[in-house]
Image (spheres, helix red, strand yellow):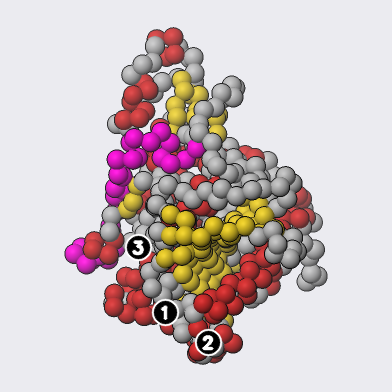
Amino acid sequence: MPRRRLRRGDLACTVAVAVAVAVAAVAVAAVGAVGGGDGGADFDYRKLSGIIIPGFASTQLRAWSVLDCPYSPFDFNPLDSVWLDTAKLLSAVNCWLKCMLLDPYNQTDHPECKSRPDSGLSAITELDPGYITGPLSSVWKEWVKWLTFETALKLRGGPSLVFAHSMGNNVFRYFLEWLKLEIAPKHYIRWLDEHIHAYFAVGAPLLGSTEAVKAALSGATFGLPVSEGTARLMFNAFGSSLWLMPFSEYCKADNIYWKHFFEGKGGCHHRQQCDEMEYKSEYSGWPTNLVSIEVPTVRDTEAYPSIMDTTENITSSMECGKPTLLSFSAREVSDGTLFKTIKDWDPQSIGLIHQLEKYYQGDPVLNPLTPWERPPIKNVFCIYGLDSKTEVGYYFAPSNSVTGKPNNSSGDGTVSYNSLSWCKNWLGPKVNITRALQAEHDGSDLQTKMNVDHHVGQGILPNMTRTPHVKYITYFEDAESIPGWRTAVWELDKVGLNQGQKKGPVRNR
């Protein structure tokens, strides 16, 4: 099969990975220079290996069955490219959809076509584009088997560097939570120390992405030659799509370890525990309500307090057809309130409710729609772009009146700043801040602030000078941290590390 040329999105993704790899080399050297918890000069960095966990829409998909496409010169045969063969999409879209869509309720293939992810390095280096498979309870089996880490340790003789891009960070988080339940607690940290030297979180949607809401409610084509309706149908058919939904920073899941200890594995339902800030803050820690919808009539909304407060004030003129405004916070998106409220007007929401309850709230390991804590890995580097135009909420109505509070910065064009920068909460009580030019420089214009006080949840502002139209990279690094641990956050102006991901949906196999 001839090699395919990279498209603009693929090139952006490739550049992002190249930036991450280059940055990683510098970071590893820096870790060695300061000791990094591994004995400094005594650590042999030649023994390190790298493990890449791809992000949203990042591997190829091939047919595993024969499908005859009537009235088209194209058919699907085993190992034919499905995700994405543009010629077949344009000439036989109904046939192509049979190979793409899954049943939204049981996640099975169409009876006439089966497709699976490609294997090998070319599956992620020759993107055109791709996807991630796997229900939450088994996605690690495809991508982050601990056998991978064991093999790397035996082959190279040392631990691994983990590079996770975009939604690949969610996959890695799930693996860590699964591992915690599989081995004894006293062995968990030792296993991580032996197998993982550093974790690089590149463009991680740590609080989700609002673009997932748009894709679920109105469709997002991500540059594909399909209608928004078709794109929405695909997105809502894949159970893993909800993994990118935004959620509140104030609501945590109950302790799954103790549930397993007392109740056994499986069959658990994650209950969210929200602190008082969830109800004192306006938007669940986001800049605005994520979704505002004008609905045509009033129907039974069941017992959802925020919605009931709205409907109590509905007048008779509204009941006669005048639209009613309903608004939903991040918590009301992630707990299913949004979809349960609009299901009478939107039948596709019924399938999303089913997926949310089965694959997320009912997952035996983790409800991933909850805030992250710093993983117990020696060296953690959180890297993302900022100050690109990024959507943070949607108003589905003829009008365009929007309220909210601005962030200090905007996101990377796909994930908002408050989600990307959540990892700043992982920094210690004292932080060193350095700002440098992205372009080559002699160091004379380097800006530094040492031992800046950091209070979790209050953010860290550099308070440094900027020259207009100049791109900087700002480093936030621990001045004080847990002994043996190091955390760093790197902000790159106008670098869209998730831009290459705007290409297609995420499937759930």
User: Which quarter shows the N terminus?
Assistant: bottom right
The residue wearing badge 1 is: 193
Q: Secondary structure at mark 1?
A: helix
Q: Is residue 12 above or below residue 235?
A: below
- In the image, which residues are magenta? 260-287
Residue placed at 32% from the left, 32% from the top? Answer: 304
The residue wearing badge 3 is: 365
Q: Is residue 498 visible?
A: no
First-in-chain label (3 vs 1)? 1
Magenta-drawn stretch contains 279 = yes
Q: Which mark is residue 41?
A: 2
Residue 352 drawn at (x, y percent): 45, 45
Q: CA distance from mark 1 to mark 2?
A: 17 Å
Q: Is residue 468 above or below residue 239?
A: above
Q: Residue 158 or 435: which is nearer the viewer?
A: 435
Q: Which mark is residue 91?
A: none
Q: Secondary structure at mark 2?
A: helix
Q: Give the amino acid at mark 1.
A: Asp
Is residue 458 rendered to the left or right of residue 413? left
Q: CA distance from mark 3 to mark 2?
A: 39 Å
Q: CA distance from mark 3 to mark 1?
A: 22 Å
Residue 327 drawn at (x, y percent): 45, 29
